[in-house]
Amino acid sequence: RERLEDELLAFVAKRGLESVHTSAKLQLGRRRCAEVDEDPIARCAWKMHDEACAELEAVLVCDRGDEDARYGAHWCPLWIIIAIRRCRDIPARQHLQDVLQRRLSPKRLKRLRSEAASAELLAELRAAIWQKRTPDVGLLQEVLWLGANPKARELDDEIKDPWLGASRDHGEPDLDRPFSPLELLAMNREADPQVTKQIVARALELKADPESTAGWGGASRALPLALSLRHVAAAEALILGGAQITPQVLGVLRRISCVEKRKALEAVLWKKHSSEQRSAEEEHDLWSLWVEVHYGFMDRALKDINSGTPVDRWVLTSLRRCPSDEAKKRIEAAL
């Protein structure tokens, strides 16, 4: 981004400041120094900063009326906060922050910074998916330090906002809905596995909820999403971080045909299951005939078969996958 900013600044210096958006002026401007500089790029950057300050003041003195009454009279869009954070010239950035502090209450400014940091967190995670790359760990650490909420969920206006660099128009229909940070991490199979584990662990440490169903109609969570996409690193990090093992999770796991990936995930899953304390009702809900057959729990499977439990195609698939030859023979005879 910094290389592109330098190119853009040089282009604007050559062509003039007509129709340059305020966000670009905030981000690319530089504070005027005492020395006389004949460099046209430096003069352009100074002019950008001067105009950005004037435009920022104009935005902050606007009275939004009842629409944002809970925030008081002064209203500030998130792209302003993001552009100021991205400003590379320290004196210019400090000057702009002074303007914000003078015009906005400390409580309002803190909330805006947290919301802007959350928007950048989600935008970076989404952009990393469709650009098929590892998320920028340095950026994620910075926005989390600035107060980004790991429980946040994308909003439609954030997803569509080209300023945040996370447009949904990139040919990925599965991304055409709002997600949480954990869900976006679960979907990025191109990310470095160790980085994925690191970011998931940090998000869970900051109280991100792996069981959140907001925005999904209560139908899916981060772990089933990671399993359905065969993202082993994300699934392992979520399981070790406290994601619940449910019938839905097992149902997604059984659809993984790659033996190596399925066994790797099963090893982590059952290690977690053996360390958990469950009520008799929860344990009963978790087990079904196909699970018992798949994992070679012969006594339970034979009991259910003899009691008339319906047999479907997944029971037969599980029989083929059963790791115990003895259990496989006896269950097959009972069937």
Image (cartoon, helix red, strand yellow):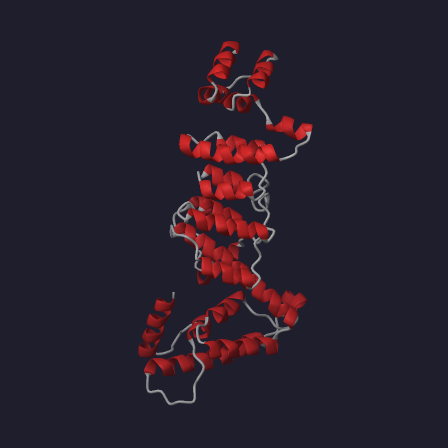
Horizontal side of 120 relative to 205 (left or right) equals: left
Q: Answer whether residue 261 is visible to the viewer in this image.
A: yes
Quarter residue 299 falls in: top right
Q: Residue furthest top?
A: 333
User: In the image shown, does 124 or 62 lie closer to the viewer?
Assistant: 124
Q: Position of residue 160 (x, y in %)?
A: 47, 56
Q: Residue at x 64, y 28 (%)?
A: 283
Task: Name the spot of residue 2 as percent of width and height, x first.
Answer: 38, 68
Residue 212 on image: x %, y %: 59, 45
**Number of numbered discs present?**
0
Query: For the N terminus, which image quadrant?
Result: bottom left
101 with respect to 190 (left or right): right
Q: Is residue 118 left or right of residue 39?
A: right
Q: Nearer the viewer, residue 67 or 54?
A: 54
Q: Is residue 167 visible?
A: no
Residue 157 location (% of width, % of height)? 51, 57
Nearer-the-camera pick, 15 or 272:
272
Q: Residue at x 58, y 66 (%)?
A: 112
Closer to us: 277 or 252: 277
